[in-house]
Amino acid sequence: MSKEKNSPSRSGAFEAGVDKRVETFTESISFDQRLFVQDIAGSIAHSEMLAQQGILADDEFQQIKTTLTEIKQEIVDGEFKYDFALEDIHMHIEKALIDRLGDIGRKLHTGRSRNDQVSTDFRLWVRDAIDRVSAKLLDLQKAFVSRCDQDVDTILPAYTHMQRAQPVLAPHYWLAYCEKLERDRERLTDARKRVNSSTLGTAAVAGTTIDIDRSKTAELLGFERIVANSLDASSDRDFVLESAFCLTTIALHLSTWAEEWIIWSTVEFNFLDLPQEFCTGSSIMPQKINPDILELIRGKTARVVGNLQALIVLTKSLPLAYNRDLQEDKPQLFDSFDTVIACLELAAPLVEQTKLNRDEIASRLDRGFLDATTLMEYMIKRGVPQRSAHHAVGALVRTAMNERKSLAELPLETFQQTQPGIDESVFESLGVENAVKSFQSFGSTAPEQVALQIAAWKARVSD
Ligand code: ARG
């Protein structure tokens, strides 16, 4: 038997053991231990394929499978001992197997390398994690949809440049977020296709001379396809970058929503009351009820963006194929998944339980001339060229501002002075209720359009 120095990856070529500082510096077990389920599934599939190919005896495969399953249970039960000398989860599990099965265990790594093993394990983990995030995204969409009926009569100002722009129905806001989250789900589904490709059996870099069957392991592990080039498989981390990007757009969308609701919950806006279970107090100012959860959702976006940046830089200019740098991909992607899942889990109940202060909102809707664009379009529909109508309404807004009135409070003569031919019907497009009802286009905040969208979303998110 070859002399195993202090690590199983040090072959007979080594004459010296490893410096302890190197063990600490190079270990990944502290973070890749969370791949144990995938590592064991990968090894069971690999040994089953080796048995099918006649490379392992059936009895050897059965012993490997049983022992790996026992090891998994020990890890789940917290009884498994970790040791930096064994570097990563792959070595830990293989060493535990060899300790129990001797030479049978020593056969497991036939036709495989840790390079394809780590890629396989990580792909399996990311595939599951994508499914978890997709489910949480759906929960958040459901939360937004669940508000639509109760808020359907509430009009909110829509803003551009953070200035009051046009009136919209509250569900129009909620469904705007549903649309963004839907694209996030679609992006994840698309990325999942490329994640779900098997690299197992590409071995270190060039493949193997052993007569393995890569389609068998791919099938056993539920992969949809097999990566065709071993050099590519050994070096590829596109699936990590793509997932990190998908998580980044989710975090960015959440940060926009969080920012919006932080502003809306201020005394200045007073549009909504956040549920107190999701607010925190101040240690010095007794009156404070702070939106810390929303602030942290906004703040944690920085980590997710930073992780993507780190991963991009990590893979930049790496020559083919596997380089140890790639070990650094896991902490970042784990953190992005953990962070986004945690944010989504809190976002859903916050969306469901927050109360709109309808009276407060309504009492200030006559500010900001939210109906000015509707008035302009009223004139256009009566034959006034757009530019002239735009100018005329601007002048009416100026007059109203000077007289501290809303547009609806101006007398008919004032409209007629600006645009001859205007009659009483002008008042039917003034005021936020009338303005909202005047919308027509697909995708607008017209009540019929919003009703259609609510119905469509209810159907989409129902199980
Ligand atoms: N711990 C390593 C990682 O996570 C496993 C692959 C090591 N491969 C190697 N040839 N050193 O990337």
Image (tube, rainbow, N blue to C red):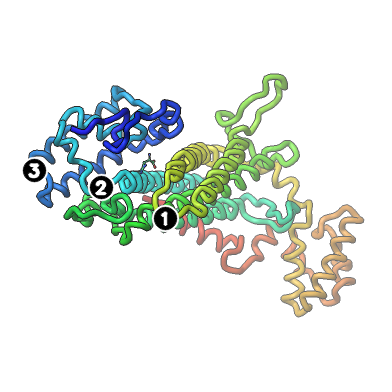
Residue at 62% of width from left, 47% of height from top?
A: 256
Circles 2 and 3 in contact, beta carbons < 8 Å: no
Q: Residue at x 66, y 39 (%)?
A: 262
- Judging by the rendered image, the residue that carries numbered circle 3 is 58
The residue where tag 1 is placed is: 320
Q: Quadrant of ligand 1?
A: top left
Of 103 and 238, the residue lying toward us: 103
Give the image location of residue 220, x and y in percent. 21, 50
Q: Indicate which disc, 2 or 3, sits on the residue closer to the N terminus.
A: 3
The three-letter code of the residue at mark 1 reads Leu
* Vertical side of 274 occupied by 433: above or below: below
Residue located 39% across and 49% down the image: 322
Labelled pair 1, 2 in contact (Cβ < 8 Å):
no
Q: Secondary structure at mark 2?
A: loop
Marker count (numbered): 3
Residue at 43%, 34% (x, y): give it: 26
Q: Nearer the viewer, residue 317 or 427?
A: 317
- In the rendered view, would you say 428 is above or below 460? below
Callout 2, which amino acid?
Arg
Ligand 1 within 8 Å of the CB at mark 3: no
Quadrant where the N terminus sits is top left
Q: Amino acid at mark 3?
A: Asp
Instruction: In the rendered structure, find residue 112 and report the number of the disc placed on it.
Output: 2
Q: Image quadrant of residue 100?
A: top left
Q: Nearer the viewer, mark 1 or mark 2?
A: 1
Q: CA distance from mark 2 to mark 3?
A: 19 Å
